[in-house]
Image (cartoon, grey):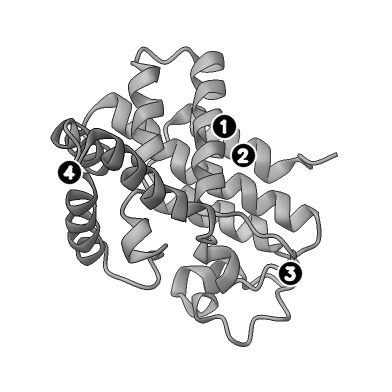
Amino acid sequence: MTKEQKVIEYYLICNKLKDVIRTGWLNWNVQKERLESVAEHIYGVQMLAIAINSEYQYNLDIRKVIFMLAIHELGETIIGDLTLFQIDKKEKEKIEHEAVHKILNNLLNGNEIEQLFLEFDKQETKEAFFAFQCDKLECDIQCKIYDEQGYVSLNSQSNNETINDSLVKELLKNKNTSWSTMWLKFSQSKYPYDENFKAISNYVLNNKITK
């Protein structure tokens, strides 16, 4: 295979993510004609990372973070966008790592890129942990946007298995709780946000963010 063929093959694989709709929005029956794709999420989380690093002055390699975020959904070109409600975390990691290895196998720098993907998954370096937090928070913010725009009704969730999760049910006990309030509080209890990410999350939780 020529270098040119390898470039185009890799590009075409990644290009598939433009057509992979984020599963969470489908599960919650978001009634918007055009829903966010995985590729759009990747762009959004990269922009969020740049802004957070700018304002909170994290002492990290932001270029490495952006690279990690560019490839962190690479496996979804093969396995699709699987949520924590659909598959065990360890099982997802296994099939996703296999998929990423297969995708990168033909690239000259494939092993280097794969190691960066694995670093993101382990969350052991400051760049990986920062990127992980950005990944989760970006989803929370998008949820709030959809909610404020009126695209979700909690009364139209008969086919949504996620709503039966024990923590989700607990957070929705109060009939006045909105979809995005539940989502943001779920993330705050589920993910180890640092104080800056908690502050941003709470701002989104307590304020109207769309104009």
Question: Disc 3 vs disc 1: which is toward the camera?
Answer: 3
Residues at circles 1 and 2 in contact by the CB criterion of under 8 Å: yes
Q: Viewer-nearest of labels 3 and 2? A: 3
Residue drawn where x is 54% and y is 42% of the image: 138
In percent of width and height, residue 22 lies at 53, 60
122 displayed left or right of 70: left
User: Mark 1 falls on what kind of element?
Assistant: helix
Which of the 4 image quadrants contains residue 82? bottom left
- Mark nearer the N terminus (4 vs 1): 4
What residue sits right under mark 3 in the picture? Answer: 31
Q: How many labels does the image show?
A: 4
Task: Residue under label 1, please give it.
Answer: 199
In the figure, residue 104 lies in which quadrant? top left
Q: Give the SS element for disc 2.
A: helix
Number of the label disc, if any, that sits on residue 106: 4
Task: Tell me the SS state at disc 3.
Answer: loop
Q: Contact (CB < 8 A) between labels 3 and 2? A: no
- Residue 36's label in the rendered image is none
Mark nearer the N terminus (3 vs 1): 3
Q: For this view, does 159 lie left or right of residue 145?
A: left
Q: What element carries label 4?
A: loop
Residue marked by disc 2: 202
Q: Which of marks 4 and 3 is nearer the N terminus?
A: 3
The local crowd at label 2, few if under 14, some if 14 to 19, many if 20 or more residues have their Cα within 10 Å, is some
> Is 110 placed above or below 173 here?
above
Q: Position of residue 88 (x, y in %)?
A: 27, 68
From what the image shows, is residue 137 above or below residue 30?
above
Quadrant occupied by the N terminus: top left
How far across and how far down the image is residue 169, in percent? 54, 74
Q: Mark 1 to mark 2: distance in Å?
A: 5 Å
The residue sitting at the bottom extreme is 158
Residue at the (58%, 86%) spot, across then down: 159
